[in-house]
Structures are given as C-alpha cells and as structure tokens.
Amino acid sequence: MAAAELPRLGLGIGWRAEIDLTVERLPGVEFVEVVAEHIRPARLPESLRVLRGRGVPVVPHGVGLGVGGAEPPSPARLAHLAECALALDSPLVSEHLAFVRAGGVEAGHLLPVPRTREALDVVTENVRRAQDALPVPLALENVAALFGWPDDELTDAEFLAELVERTGVLLLVDVANLYTNQVNLGLSAVEALDRLPLSRLAYVHVAGGEEHGGLWHDTHTATVPEAILDVLAELCARAAPPGVLLEWDDAYPSDAALAAELSRVAAAMTRIPS
C-alpha cells in the first residue's frame, strides 16, 4: 500500500468496554481502536456495531502476537486478528514490535526486541508470515522500554526503518513510547522521528503516564503531559499522520475530561514546535 493510499482516520480514541457509551457520544471521534484479544469476532460488542453503523472505522490492535520473538507467530492468533479485521471491516490491523513469550512462558509485558542484525532477520520473517495471513495491511508499533539490550547494533528507529524497507509494513508511531525511551534510555525522541520512515505512517498513539523513581511508566491512566504533546507536534511538523489516537486504559475520567484531552491532542497536531 503506497502512502497516498493510506486511509484517513482522523482523531480517535481507544475503545474499551468500560467507556463504550462514552466513546459513542464523545464529539469529534473519527475512528476507534479495540484490543483484538478483548473481543470475539462472532459476537461483537453492541457499541462497536453502533460505531460501525455510523461509518466509524474500527482498528483491531493486537497485544499478544509477539512478532519479535524467536518463534513464528501463532497461526491461531493470526487467524483471530484476521477474523477481527473482517468482522469489523477494518482498514488495517496493528500490533507491537515486541516479544511477549519464549518457550511457552508468557512475559506479561511488551518487551523490547534486541536491536541486532540477527534479530532483524527473524523479525522480518515473522512480519512476512503475519502479512501473508492477514486480509488487510499490518502496522507495527514501537514499544516503551525500561531497559535496553547490551548487544544492540541499531537504534529502535533504525531497526524499524530497515524492517519497513524489507517488508513494506506500516508504522504505528507511539509518541508516548518515544518520550518514555527518551526519559528511561536517553534516546532522543526527535532524532527517532528524523530516522523513522514517516511516509509509511498508518497512525499515531498518544497517552499519559507517571514518573516513579526517575523512570517514566507508560500507564495510559493520566492526562497527557505537555512534553509528549510536544513530541506529537514534532511528528506533525514532519508528516501529516492519517490518524492520531488517544489511549486511556484505566482510572477513567469523566466524559468532559476525555473530550478535553482529545481537544488538547487536536491542538498539538497544529502546533508549531518551539
């Protein structure tokens, strides 16, 4: 899919069962994202059917595929993602560039992939398998990290750029994760934006978090700090993202507070970086 063919998604929010009615009535929501592992394609939640009936695109977002692992992605997990995309008539599917299990043991977290040439070869093959199994394009998200691997040969942005070149996979750029890695690992978010192939951008994530003991935790449970909105503004100064989506996963605020957050995100998209 060429950049010119990428669907325009607009301003969005993560759909969660706890705020389904809120998402339905929030002004300005042009698309939503649903965690694929939280739904059954044969019995979609009524709220998602309502949104689809209005023409609101719904993007399945996987958290358990583990394309960054040494093992090939599970055919059953790929089939579920494909079924979600078909049931929701989705324009694309997204997942994470992460590993989540090894030897049958679940990590319980989205862990960073070692940025080595050897790992890149493995991930390339896993991504190609996933693309072949899905009926719509795949976008991969950069993850937040609390640590880096000692043998890394590439930066996160360089790894993603080469993966895109090899596979044509789309990018889901999480600016909150770029900020997290800047705080925790000293990796410049702006330098990452300069190295990522933003012409392959599918959409963007933005979310709040919390600082504990000098580390930033991407919790998706707080208002988005200005520093993360600054990273979003930097991205929008370099490329026009097809969509920007606010994530909020727990400790849900009022409808008015979520509407205000969406307005802050929309304003940051047109802000001139300082």
Image: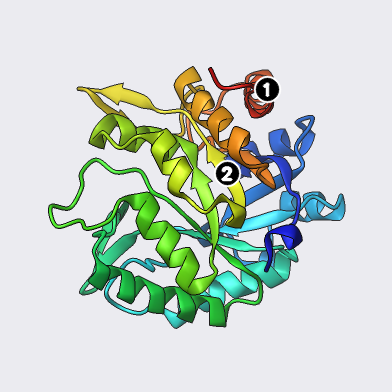
Report helix, strand or loop for mark 1.
helix
Q: Residue at x 20, y 56 (%)?
A: 152
Which residue is more in the foreground, 233 or 205? 233
Most foreground residue, 111 or 231: 231
Instruction: Please give the name of the residue rendered at 63% of the width and 68% of the height, measured from the top-left corner.
Output: 84
- Left or right, 24 with reference to 274: right
Residue labelled with disc 2: 204
Q: Residue at x 17, y 53 (%)?
A: 149
Whether label 1 touches label 2, CB < 8 Å = no
The location of residue 66, given as percent across then percent down, is 37, 66
Question: Left or right: where does residue 54 sit relative to residue 44?
Answer: right
Residue 7 visible somewhere in the drawing = yes
Relative to 144, residue 63 above or below: below
Residue 28 lies in what quarter of the image? top right
> What residue sits right under mark 1 in the picture?
267
Q: Secondary structure at mark 2?
A: strand
Q: Residues within 10 Å of mark 2 (few under 14, many from 20)?
A: many
Q: CA distance from mark 1 to mark 2?
A: 15 Å
Decide: few, some or many residues near mark 1? Use Cα within 10 Å; few <14, some 14-19, many ≥20.
few
Q: Determine the residue positioned at 69% across, 47% down.
A: 242
Quadrant of res 160: bottom left
For marks 1 and 2, the one nearer the N-term is 2
| Percent coordinates x, y for residue 238 in the rendering | 59, 38
Residue 83's x, y, as percent? 63, 74
Q: Residue furthest left?
A: 150
Q: Is 76 rendered above or below residue 41?
A: below
**Quadrant assignment, res 210:** top left
